Image (cartoon, rainbow, N blue to C red):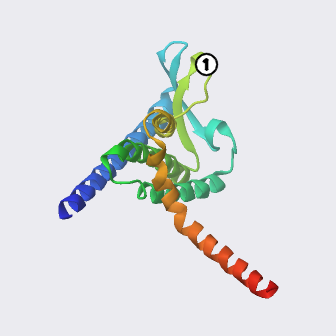
């Protein structure tokens, strides 16, 4: 049992290190964009296809909710804590390691943008796909988008229905409480009708 506990702690520590590395990479690239791209202008990586261009996003994805920084910040923080809670509910079996790592990327992406919203009052975006005129995004957005796609692919092709039992177990306690409450109400109704 002790060996499993140590392995569990080592794995959590590794994930924490991954998390900090991912957030650091995101913040370094955004700092570079603020200093280099804002001063020197856009850099064309592949002409007509990919450009690095500084942009201050005061909204959410694709610029929706522009100017609602406080609401987005509070919502993002709440969402982050929900993600953190769910991360600790993912089973510690080897089979679920991909989900754990993907979850670390998702949380790092969320925190990367939260840091910007708190410190700058906007999110720094700088990757622009000119070819399809895709909205400008950043590394944290990549973490979130690619991780969500991978999670969907794993959910469809890798995990079986039984693998999702842990999700049901998260909410099982609440269901049991509701069932007990319903049973008590039914018993009281039976007593009053009887």
Give percent across and percent down for residue 57.
Answer: 61, 40
Name, please, the residue furthest toward the front: 194
Tell me what residue is drawn at x 55 percent, y 50 percent.
Answer: 117
Name, please, the residue furthest toward the left: 3
Q: Nearer the viewer, residue 127 or 5?
A: 5
Question: Total marks drawn?
Answer: 1
Q: Nearer the viewer, residue 155 or 115?
A: 155
**In which quadrant is the N terminus drawn?**
bottom left
Tell me what residue is drawn at x 28 percent, y 55 percent.
Answer: 13
Could you classify mark 1 by the number of other residues whose Cα lies within 10 Å: few (under 14), some (14-19), or many (20 or more)? Answer: few
Give percent across and percent down for residue 134.
Answer: 61, 25
Tell me what residue is drawn at x 42 percent, y 35 percent.
Answer: 158
In the rendered view, would you say 191 is above or below 57? below
Q: Nearer the viewer, residue 95 or 129?
A: 95
In the rendered view, would you say 13 is above or below 31? below
**In which quadrant is the C terminus drawn?**
bottom right
Left or right, 26 with respect to 9, comes to right
Tell me what residue is drawn at x 42 percent, y 36 percent.
Answer: 29
In the rendered view, would you say 186 is above or below 159? below
Name, please, the residue furthest toward the top: 47
Q: Nearer the viewer, residue 190 or 152?
A: 190
Give percent across and percent down for residue 72.
Answer: 62, 52
Quadrant for residue 135, please give it: top right
Q: What residue is disc 1 on?
A: 132
In the rendered view, would you say 124 is above or below 189? above
Give percent across and percent down for residue 186.
Answer: 72, 77
Left or right, 13 with respect to 75, comes to left
Left or right, 166 with respect to 76, comes to left
Q: Secondary structure at mark 1?
A: helix
């Amino acid at each position: 049992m002790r060996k499993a506990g140590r392995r569990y702690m080592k794995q959590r520590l590794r994930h924490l290190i991954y998390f900090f590395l991912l957030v650091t990479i995101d913040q370094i690239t955004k700092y570079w964009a603020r200093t280099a791209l804002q001063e020197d202008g856009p850099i064309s990586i592949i002409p007509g296809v990919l450009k690095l261009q500084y942009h201050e996003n005061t909204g959410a994805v694709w610029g929706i909710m522009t100017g609602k920084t406080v609401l987005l910040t509070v919502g993002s923080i709440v969402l982050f804590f929900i993600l953190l809670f769910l991360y600790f509910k993912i089973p510690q079996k080897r089979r679920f390691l991909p989900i754990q790592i993907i979850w670390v990327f998702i949380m790092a992406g969320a925190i990367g943008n939260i840091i910007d919203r708190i410190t700058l009052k906007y999110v720094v975006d700088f990757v622009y796909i000119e070819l399809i005129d895709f909205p400008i995004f950043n590394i944290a957005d990549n973490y979130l988008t690619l991780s969500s796609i991978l999670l969907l692919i794993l959910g469809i092709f890798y995990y079986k229905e039984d693998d999702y039992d842990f999700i049901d177990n998260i909410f099982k306690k609440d269901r049991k409480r509701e069932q007990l409450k319903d049973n008590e109400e039914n018993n009281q109704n039976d007593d009053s009708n009887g």
